[in-house]
Image: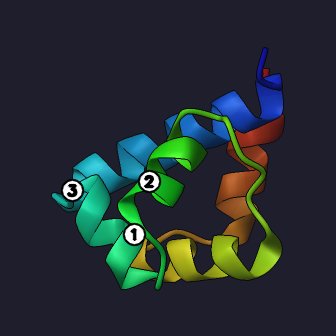
Amino acid sequence: MYSDFNIKLGLYLKNARKNKGMTQEELGKAVGKSKAWYVDIERGKNNLYFDDAKKLASVLGFTLDELANFVSSE
């Protein structure tokens, strides 16, 4: 079972990606990772490290504060 934190994080990223009109493959490439890596992040299967979170935030147009607030909210 995946952690609630990772699942909520994945949901936020998925919504942000779709709002930006990007595919999983495009986003993975934009941050220097593979589609498989990004798919696992969206599904909550992998932990997201700070440097990667910063890259995703930059590409998707949100701040790390916005991401943290969403993930920590009930």
Task: Report if the CB atoms under discs 1 and 2 are less than 8 Å apart.
Answer: yes
Count of numbered labels shown in the rendering:
3
Q: Position of residue 26 (x, y in %)?
A: 24, 69
Q: Position of residue 10 (x, y in %)?
A: 57, 40
Badge 3 crowding class, 10 Å Cα cut-off, few under 14, some 14 to 19, many 20 or more, is few
Q: Quadrant of residue 34?
A: bottom left
Whichever of callouts 1 and 2 sits on the residue coming sooner in the sequence is 1
The answer to whether one can see residue 70 in this image is yes
* Left or right of 36 on screen, residue 57: right
Element at label 1 = helix
* Nearer to me, 26 or 12: 26
Going by the numbered disc 3, the residue's amino acid type is: Thr
Q: Position of residue 63 (x, y in %)?
A: 62, 72
Q: CA distance from mark 1 to mark 2?
A: 8 Å
Q: Nearer the viewer, mark 1 or mark 2?
A: 2
Element at label 3 = loop
Q: CA distance from mark 2 to mark 3?
A: 12 Å
The answer to whether one can see residue 73 in this image is no
Quarter in which the C terminus is drawn: top right
Going by the numbered disc 1, the residue's amino acid type is: Gly
Q: Nearer the viewer, mark 2 or mark 3?
A: 2
Specify the farthest residue to the left.
21
The residue carrying mark 2 is 36
Whichever of callouts 1 and 3 sits on the residue coming sooner in the sequence is 3
**Which disc, if any, is residue 23?**
3
Element at label 2 = helix
Q: CA distance from mark 1 to mark 3?
A: 9 Å
Task: Report if the CB atoms under discs 1 and 3 are less than 8 Å apart.
Answer: no
Q: Residue at x 39, y 69 (%)?
A: 28
